[in-house]
Image (spheres, rainbow, N blue to C red):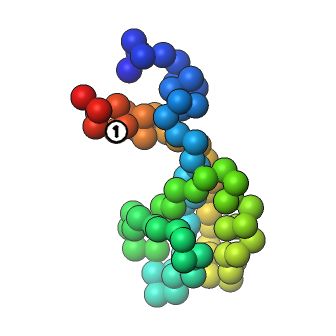
Amino acid sequence: MVALGRPSDLKAQVYQTLRLELFFQPDNPPALPVYLNHHEIDAGRWLVYLEWDKVEPVLAALDLRHIDDFRLYSATLEDLYLHYAKQS
């Protein structure tokens, strides 16, 4: 990946999405908007990929009584590696 460019440049090219990690009690998962898919990372921990323009409405729709914590961040180096590994 070093030969492909700086991580910030690669992130801009590869992902126009953000990662939303949700942490909650496993027996009380949050309701998500119907158009969102989640990936279960662990019991009580989901990963959701969001387009930039969906962040505000999704966060506003979440019932924070069912969420212990959340993290919102851009693509990681691991995401970049997986993206380029799939292409080769």
Whether residue 27 is situated above or below residue 11 in the rendered picture: below
Which percent across, then down, holds residue 44? 46, 74
**Image-quadrant location for residue 42:** bottom left
Quadrant in the picture for the C terminus: top left
Q: Which residue is at 74% across, 61% downward?
A: 56
Mark 1: amino acid: Leu
**Image-quadrant location for residue 86:** top left
Q: Residue furthest left?
A: 88
Whether residue 68 is situated above or below residue 16 in the rendered picture: below
Q: Nearer the viewer, residue 56 or 53?
A: 53
Which percent across, then down, holds residue 28? 52, 86
Indicate left or right for 79 with 59 as reference: left
Q: Nearer the viewer, residue 53 or 65?
A: 53
Q: Which residue is at 54% across, 77% downward?
A: 34
Q: Which residue is at 70% across, 75% downward?
A: 61
Give neighbour class at mark 1: few <14, some 14-19, many 20+ (Cα, 10 Å): few
Q: Nearer the viewer, residue 23 or 4?
A: 4
Query: What residue is shown with label 1?
Result: 82
Which percent across, then down, holds residue 1? 38, 20
Question: How many numbered discs, if any?
Answer: 1
Q: Secondary structure at mark 1?
A: helix
Whether residue 16 is situated above or below residue 53 in the rendered picture: above
Q: Which residue is at 61% across, 53% downward?
A: 51
Indicate left or right for 43 with 12 as reference: left
